[in-house]
Image: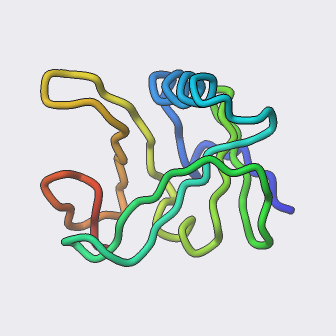
Amino acid sequence: MSNVQNETEIKVTEKAANQVQQIMKENKVPEGYGLRVGVKGGGCSGLTYTLGFDGEYREGDTIIEENGVKLFVDGKSLFYLTGMELDFTDGLNGRGFIFNNPNAVKTCGCGESFSV
């Protein structure tokens, strides 16, 4: 099992961490669960970000703990997400998580898909 706390992997802003914790509390997500962050094929730019709650370590996962939030990231996704910052906005243009990914050379207008 790989437990990484290296800030060069994936960063979680305090605002995003607070939102994740609030969602977990509102949805009664069991203690010990974390946020699974990943990438899958699809979207208008080729790759799409995925987020979901998970309570299990899977072989090949890296576990990152930042600002009180535990992230599970599979090895393939980590390749595309290294250096990314997960943020949250609730401004006038919408509400949701923002993926600030330095590896993305092209993103779609909604910010949910990208290419490298």
How was the colour assigned to the protein in this rendering?
A: rainbow
- Residue 73 at what x, y percent from top left? 63, 59
Residue at the spot x=30%, y=28% of the render? 89
Left or right, 76 with respect to 115, comes to right
Q: Toward the viewer: 13 or 46?
A: 46
Q: Toward the viewer: 107 or 35?
A: 35
- Residue 7 at what x, y percent from top left? 61, 42
Q: How many numbered callouts?
A: 0
Residue at the spot x=28%, y=77% of the render? 46
Residue at the spot x=34%, y=41% of the render? 98
- Residue 51 at what x, y percent from top left? 50, 52
Q: Say above or below: 36 vs 7.
A: below
Q: Toward the viewer: 67 or 110?
A: 110
Left or right, 77 with respect to 67, comes to left
Q: Toward the viewer: 5 or 50?
A: 50
Residue at the spot x=30%, y=64% of the render? 104
- Residue 87 at what x, y percent from top left? 40, 35
Q: Which part of the image, by quadrant, shows the N terminus?
A: bottom right
Q: Residue furthest right?
A: 1
Q: Which part of the image, by quadrant, shows the C terminus?
A: bottom left
Q: Say above or below: 63 vs 81.
A: above
